[in-house]
Amino acid sequence: EMYKNPFFGWSTYDVGGAFLNTETGELQDELVQIVRVIFSFESELAIAKKKGYERIVQSITSWLLINYYHRVALPPYGEAEIQRFIDEHAPFSEKELAYIKTNYPAIATEILKWFDDCVLFTFGYLARRFWKKVAEVGGINVLRPGK
């Protein structure tokens, strides 16, 4: 019930190229199909939609994505992390600083939930469907090891 589908769309394209096989010294052609899954984040928080602060919400989103690994070690909305964000994105006006210090925890909580929903969609849905299709066509025998 907490999950909100972040899926926005998808696109595919082919990439062709030639690659040197270092073992044989031969040039090999290869065609790869790329599938891009597009997720869209739009805050539902009135504080995040406040006119004039959109770039701060975008910066917080990018910051949390880049520093996602900190989530395990530190609360993403603790005082130390908020100060790190401010230090790395300065300068801010006094109004912007007050907005960040007041609203960062709520915005970060919403963004991190969105990240989790993207991961659930990607691995809980797409990867499982891909695995089931591979197992179905017999590409790998994951259902009966050793056969």
Image (spheres, helix red, strand yellow):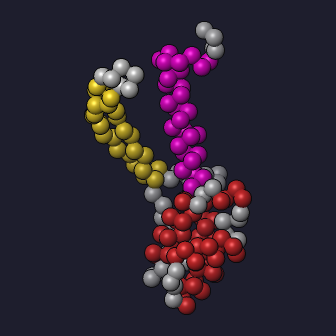
Q: Is residue 126 left or right of residue 23?
A: right
Residue in the picture at 53% in, 28% down: 131
Magenta-span inclusion, residue 129 = yes
Residue 136: image location, x then y, percent:
51, 19
Which residue is outermost to the top?
Answer: 147
Magenta-span inclusion, residue 133 = yes
Residue in the picture at 47% in, 50% down: 7
Q: On screen, 80 above or below 142?
A: below
Q: Quadrant of residue 4?
A: bottom right
Q: Is residue 113 left or right of residue 56?
A: right
Q: Is residue 20 left or right of residue 68?
A: left
Magenta span: predominant SS is helix
Residue 87: image location, x then y, percent:
58, 77
Q: On screen, 52 above or below 26?
A: below
The answer to whether residue 6 of the structure is visible from this angle is yes
Magenta region: which residues? 115-143
Residue 66: image location, x then y, percent:
54, 60
The answer to whether residue 50 of the structure is visible from this angle is no
